[in-house]
């Protein structure tokens, strides 16, 4: 399946794995890349040297292109931006800010830069500052989200920029992939389905929560703080939303979630942990290998698109 994204990134299929904090590490990234997609290591707020080690570990497990996702509001962002260059990483995706101050150095090093955007205004800004493509992520996605749905956002971003657009948010199978292409996207980014994959390192309790999830099982916390996050509902989200509705101060809300994603991923705390997942969780019914997931998506999407024509 050849598109502008496969050509840009040198990958077999236009499928990118989401940069999920605590989830997207070297094992998952290399598995996705070996399956023909683009795996990502999520830097999140981790120390730069941890990111360097993960990059080196991934290189031992794959000779295919992979990338690093950088959360730009992290205090480690400056150091990670340098590590990317020093370690010869080919692709960077970014979130939670603008990568403009790193762009000249990255471009000089031949790094492909793909910011995640939730609006046409930010997409245009990223194109102006030299982005090679953008990920248009709808509110259906897990983790940190914007407000516009994927169905509405993707075609508007496609119309707003001339660089390739990757669709994200609510995509977990070939039907979503085909729909994204019909909207004008040249690739898709998938998070929740990869989080539940066989190669994912998250705790089995977390995986099972995704596999058991129904269509109505996600909640958005943090709207009052300006940092909305989509998660699976559990005891923590119920308490958080009650406090939020009661007007609890930011500090009280923050104390409830501090370390909660790590507890979910590493300890399997499905009651008090933060189970980040998108609305596509209801579509994820079994834990597939990354290869099975990507091949299945591509086969179904091609079948649907050929039928449509």
Image: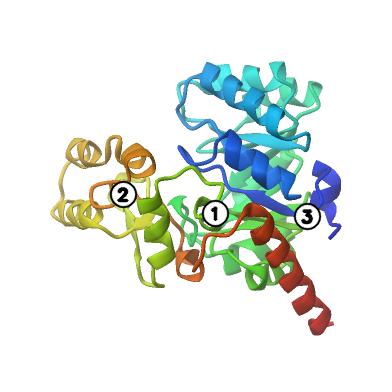
> Could you tell me which residue is drawn at 71 percent across and 56 percent down?
160
Element type where label 1 sits in the image: loop
Local packing at callout 2 (Cα closer than 10 Å; few below 14, some 14-19, many 20+) is: some
Q: Position of residue 101 (x, y in %)?
A: 63, 24
Q: Position of residue 150 (x, y in %)?
A: 57, 64
> Could you tell me which residue is drawn at 72 percent across and 73 percent down?
300
> Could you tell me which residue is drawn at 69 percent across and 66 percent down?
296
Element type where label 3 sits in the image: loop
Q: Nearer the viewer, mark 3 or mark 1?
A: 1
Q: Earlier in the sequence, mark 2 or mark 3?
A: 3
Element type where label 2 sits in the image: loop
225 or 190, nearer to the observer: 190
Q: Is residue 125 visible?
A: no
Q: Nearer the viewer, mark 2 or mark 3?
A: 3
The residue pinned by badge 2 equals: 222
Q: Quadrant of the N terminus?
A: bottom right
Q: Nearer the viewer, mark 2 or mark 1?
A: 1
Which of the 4 image quarters holds residue 131? top right
The residue pinned by badge 3 equals: 13
Q: Earlier in the sequence, mark 2 or mark 1?
A: 1
Q: Position of residue 30 (x, y in %)?
A: 66, 39
Local packing at callout 1 (Cα closer than 10 Å; few below 14, some 14-19, many 20+) is: many
Q: Position of residue 29 (x, y in %)?
A: 63, 40
Which of the 4 image quarters holds residue 116? top right
Tell me the distance, in whole angstroms, between the alpha carbons under discs 2 and 3: 35 Å
> Could you tell me which residue is drawn at 25 percent across and 54 percent down?
237
The residue pinned by badge 1 equals: 197
User: Would residue 267 be found to the left or right of residue 48 on screen?
Assistant: left
User: Would residue 254 be found to the left or right of residue 154 on screen?
Assistant: left
Which of the 4 image quarters holds residue 261? top left
Q: Is residue 104 visible?
A: yes
Tell me the distance, in whole angstroms, between the alpha carbons under discs 2 and 1: 28 Å
């Amino acid at each position: 399946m050849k598109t502008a994204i496969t050509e840009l990134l040198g990958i077999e299929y236009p499928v990118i794995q989401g940069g999920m904090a605590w989830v997207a590490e070297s094992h998952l990234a290399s598995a996705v890349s070996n399956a023909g997609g683009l795996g990502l290591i999520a830097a999140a707020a981790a120390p730069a040297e941890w990111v360097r080690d993960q990059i080196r570990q991934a290189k031992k497990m794959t000779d295919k292109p992979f990338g690093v996702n950088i959360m730009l509001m992290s205090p480690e962002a400056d150091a990670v931006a340098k590590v990317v260059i020093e370690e010869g990483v080919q692709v960077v995706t970014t979130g939670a800010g603008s990568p403009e101050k790193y762009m000249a150095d990255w471009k000089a090093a031949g790094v492909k830069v793909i910011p995640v955007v939730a609006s046409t205004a930010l997409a245009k800004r990223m194109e102006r500052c030299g982005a090679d493509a953008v990920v248009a992520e709808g509110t259906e996605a897990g983790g940190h989200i914007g407000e516009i749905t994927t169905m509405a956002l993707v075609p508007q971003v496609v119309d707003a920029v001339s660089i390739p657009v990757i669709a994200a948010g609510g995509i977990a199978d070939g039907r979503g992939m085909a729909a994204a292409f019909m909207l004008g996207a040249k690739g898709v980014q998938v998070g929740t389905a990869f989080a539940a994959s066989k190669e994912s390192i998250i705790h089995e309790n977390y995986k099972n929560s995704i596999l058991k999830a129904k269509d109505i099982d996600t909640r958005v916390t943090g709207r009052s703080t300006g940092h909305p996050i989509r998660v699976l509902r559990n005891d923590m989200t119920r308490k958080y939303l009650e406090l939020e509705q009661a007007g609890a101060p930011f500090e009280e809300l923050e104390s409830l979630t501090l370390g909660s994603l790590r507890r979910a991923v590493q300890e399997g705390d499905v009651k008090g942990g933060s189970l980040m997942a998108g609305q596509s969780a209801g579509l994820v019914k079994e834990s597939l290998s990354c290869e099975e997931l990507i091949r299945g998506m591509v086969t179904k999407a091609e079948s649907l698109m050929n039928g449509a024509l």
